[in-house]
Amino acid sequence: MARADAVAAAASSPDAALIAAWRSGDEQAAAELVRRHARALARFLASAGARDADVDDLVQETFIRAFRAVDRFRNQCQFRTWLLTIGGNVLKDASRRAKRALVVPLDDGLRATDGDPHERTVAVELEARLQQGLEQLPRMQREVFLLRAQQGMEYDDIAAALGTSPGAARVHYHHAAKRLKEHLK
């Protein structure tokens, strides 16, 4: 019963309390951190260029690395910011490995066919153009844009995650948004 109370308390506590609980051996605290942050991490990784088939593995690898390094987390930024930084590094490592491997893509005919054909076509085209625009952005602009637009992070947190200043993060975001608007015209 005390275990259930501890889990319930952890579920309503900030990430710092969960991290402290995990450090002291509470595996339920780690599960709660995963529950809180896995979806946002997956969205970030997918938008940053991870293949759909790889997102779950990348999320898992990110949490493995984060939990192994949790003693180095110093609360200088939010846990999610730190986690997304690790996720970005995991994605970079996976991209380097993928460049060395031969990949045979699946046939496009295997995609889902439900929904209105016109809306689906427009959405697929827009998504492809946006993804192409994101890929053309310099790395820093792309990462700042994704952290701000997709994750809703503040410039101070983005700056901490990417090792830059909040002012520079604002400039990178502005340039990224401008380039993407021009690309989508």
Image (tube, rainbow, N blue to C red):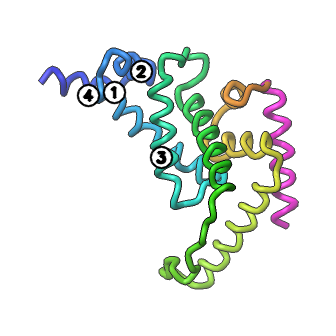
Given contact means CB atoms under 8 Å apart, are the residues at marks 2 and 1 in contact? yes
What numbered label is drawn on residue 8?
4
Disc 2 crowd, CA 10 A, few/some/many (<14, 14-19, 20+): many
Residue at disc 4, secondary structure: helix
Q: Residue furthest left?
A: 1
Q: Earlier in the sequence, mark 2 or mark 4?
A: 4
Disc 1 crowd, CA 10 A, few/some/many (<14, 14-19, 20+): many
Q: Quadrant of residue 181?
A: bottom right
Magenta residues, start to end: 165-185
Tag 2 residue: 19
- Is residue 179 covered in magenta? yes
Say what amino acid the circle numbered 4 marks: Ala
Say what amino acid the circle numbered 3 marks: Arg
Residue at disc 3, secondary structure: helix
Disc number lying in front (4 or 1): 1
Give the Cα separation between the discs numbered 3 and 1: 17 Å
Disc number lying in front (4 or 3): 3
Residue 23 left/right relative to 111: left
Query: Quick one: 135 or 90, which is closer to the camera?
Result: 90
Query: Quick one: 143 or 100, which is closer to the camera?
Result: 100
Say what amino acid the circle numbered 2 marks: Ile
Give the Cα separation between the discs numbered 4 and 1: 10 Å
Query: Quick one: 138 or 113, which is closer to the camera?
Result: 138
Q: Earlier in the sequence, mark 3 or mark 2?
A: 2
Disc 3 crowd, CA 10 A, few/some/many (<14, 14-19, 20+): few
Tag 1 residue: 29
Residue at disc 1, secondary structure: helix
